[in-house]
Structure formats: C-alpha cells, structure tokens
Image (cartoon, rainbow, N blue to C red):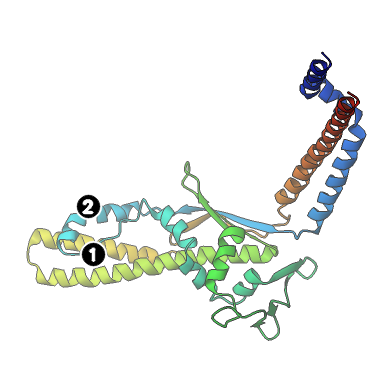
C-alpha cells in the first residue's frame, strides 16, 4: 500500500549509510574548512592574548642519614625504656619534605619574606626589558605598600595565608617524587622568570632550615634528658646504651650545623627560565581546531537531516 511504501521510505531515510554520510561531508568540505579556520584563528588570537608563564625547576636528592639512623634504631628499645622518643624519619624523609612544602604552615612562613605576598596575589605582567614584575595597581599599591579592594568578612583587605594557599598549590608550586630514583622535583611557575627562580630558592632553603631547626630542637631535648639519665644510672650496659644514644644525637647536631643543604641536596639547581611555558597555549589551539571541525561537520549533518525531513513531510502532505 501507499502508507507502507512511505514507512519503508521513512526507514530508508533514517538508516545510517556511512558512504552517504562521508559523501555529504565531502560535498560540504568548504563550509567545514571555513568554520575550522575561523575557530583556529580565534583560538590563536586568544592564546596570544594570554600572559606568558615561566617555570623554574629543581631536582633534589635526600641526604643520606643511614648511619645515624642505624644507631638510633639499634638502641631504640633502650631509649623507649627510659621514656625517650627517638626520630625514625629516615625512610620517610621524602614524604616529610613533600608534606612540609605543601603545608599551610609552610606557606604562612614563606609569606613573612618581603615581596612574596604581592608577587603571588597581585601579578599583572612581566616587563622583559626592565626584567621587572608589574603589580596590579587595583589590587596592590607598590608605593604605599597597601592592599586595595573590597574588605572581607573580618574587615581586612590584605589576603590571608589561606587565600594564598589555594593559588600556591594549584597554580604556582608543584612537588613530586620519582618512585624509581627517589629524587624530588620541585617547580615554580610565575609571570616573572626571576621570581620563579628566587621563590624556588626560597622554598628549598626554608624547607632545609625548617627541618634542621626541628631536628636540632628534638636533639637538644633528647640530649638534656639522656645526660640526666646518665648521671642517675650506674648499670654499665645501660650507661653504654645511653652514651651511644648521646653520640647519635651529637652526630645529628653536627650534621645539622655543618650542612646548609641539610636534607634537600641539589642535583639540578633552580634556574632562570628563558622560554615561557607554551603547552597550555598549544593545547588551546589544538582543541579549538578539533572542536571547530566537529562543529562544522555537525552543522552540515544537521542541515542535511532537516532537508530530508522536509522532503518526507512534503511527501506525506501530498498523500
């Protein structure tokens, strides 16, 4: 019947024919190319308008403290009997360093250094000629060294260390450990290549200093207690164990005082990057070009579908 013929025709129209689909796209290749080119040009212009970011990176090794840690492990039992808790962070040093650098307390400490907070929270642009970082005058007044903007709930305008922490972790600092070699990689990304290098130097220096001070303080307290126990005990074996523990604590203090790079030892030191990081801009252009071609193809197929639907509706109306 006529109705059956129309239904069969409708089925044929809905049936996907890859060859016909390809021919449709091929016939409209000019439109697809135009749409793709327009999207590519727009993405290139947008990418060019983005600020250039520079990345300074350093590869570090963890100083081997196996000898002193071995002594501490050997006499940890005796130390426990005397109520002394000895540090056993030898194997956990890499994770200890990473957690320190990623901690809010450490970020708060870094902000005490002059110029760090404005450089992180109010960067506007980098002048390659003068090699200076330009700060956003709507956020920070460089002359009066005062912050501008709407007050927060507590009434302050100056960004807090918690405000900085999110940017510090997401956009500025990256730290990771190579599971194969055990080396730690730390990188800093910023508008200014010089600030990127200087801030990375500061992070490494203060991480070493923080861990050094922590170990020195713990060692000082342990020595005071061990010496008091040595004076009170007369057992030869126990006194020998205490003396060995005292020796290990003195070794920790010696290493802390003579080594500037107490824990983190530079294998590849921080550097001033000469080229901007361009990966993000390239990805923007690549993805925009792909999306442009897909959009062009979608427009062509949608137009063809509407055309066929219109033809079918016309045939049904004639019946």
User: How many residues crowd mark 2 within 10 Å: few (<14), some (14–19), many (20+)?
Assistant: some
Q: Determine the CA span between mark 1 and mark 2.
A: 13 Å
Quadrant for the C terminus, please: top right
Tag 1 residue: 246
Q: Is residue 264 above or below residue 25?
A: below
- The picture places residue 214, in percent across and down from the top left corner, at 37, 68
Side of 76 relative to 184 (left or right): left
Tag 2 residue: 74
Residue at the image point whose x is 17% and y is 73% from the top: 228
Residue at the image point whose x is 60% and y is 73% from the top: 117
Residue at the image point whose x is 39% and y is 52% from the top: 64
Q: Is residue 150 above or below residue 82?
A: below
Q: Quadrant of residue 316?
A: top right
Side of 302 relative to 203 (left or right): right
Q: Is residue 135 above or below residue 27?
A: below
Q: Is residue 260 visible?
A: no
Quadrant for the N terminus, please: top right
Q: Secondary structure at mark 2?
A: helix
- The picture places residue 90, in percent across and down from the top left corner, at 35, 53
Q: Quadrant of residue 241?
A: bottom left
Q: Is residue 169 visible?
A: yes
Q: Residue furthest bottom?
A: 144
Q: Which of 78/237 is in front?
A: 78
User: How many residues crowd mark 1 within 10 Å: few (<14), some (14–19), many (20+)?
Assistant: many
């Amino acid at each position: 019947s006529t109705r059956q013929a129309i239904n069969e025709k409708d089925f044929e129209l809905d049936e996907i024919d890859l060859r016909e689909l390809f021919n449709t796209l091929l016939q409209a290749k000019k439109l697809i190319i135009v749409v793709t080119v327009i999207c590519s040009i727009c993405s290139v212009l947008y990418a060019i308008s983005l600020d250039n970011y520079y990345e300074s990176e350093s590869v570090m090794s963890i100083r081997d403290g196996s000898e002193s840690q071995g002594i501490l492990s050997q006499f940890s039992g005796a130390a426990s009997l005397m109520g002394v808790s000895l540090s056993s962070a030898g194997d956990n040093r890499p994770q200890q360093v990473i957690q320190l650098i990623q901690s809010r307390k450490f970020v708060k400490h870094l902000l005490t250094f002059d110029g760090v907070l404005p450089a992180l929270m109010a960067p506007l642009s980098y002048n390659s000629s003068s090699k200076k970082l330009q700060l956003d005058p709507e956020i920070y007044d460089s002359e009066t060294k005062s912050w501008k903007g709407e007050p927060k709930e507590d009434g302050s305008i100056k960004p807090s260390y918690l405000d900085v922490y999110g940017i510090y972790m997401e956009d500025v600092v990256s730290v990771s450990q190579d599971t194969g070699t055990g080396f730690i990689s730390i990188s800093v990304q910023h508008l200014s290549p010089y600030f990127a290098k200087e801030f990375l130097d500061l992070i490494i220096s203060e991480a070493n200093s923080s861990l050094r001070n922590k170990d020195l303080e713990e060692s000082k307290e342990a020595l005071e207690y061990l010496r008091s126990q040595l004076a009170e005990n007369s057992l030869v074996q126990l006194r020998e164990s205490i003396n060995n523990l005292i020796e290990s604590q003195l070794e920790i203090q010696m290493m802390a005082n003579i080594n500037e790079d107490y824990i983190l030892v530079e294998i590849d030191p921080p550097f001033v990057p000469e080229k901007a990081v361009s990966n993000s801009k390239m990805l923007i252009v690549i993805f925009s070009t792909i999306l442009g071609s897909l959009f062009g193809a979608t427009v062509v197929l949608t137009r063809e579908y509407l055309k066929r639907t219109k033809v079918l509706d016309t045939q049904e109306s004639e019946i």
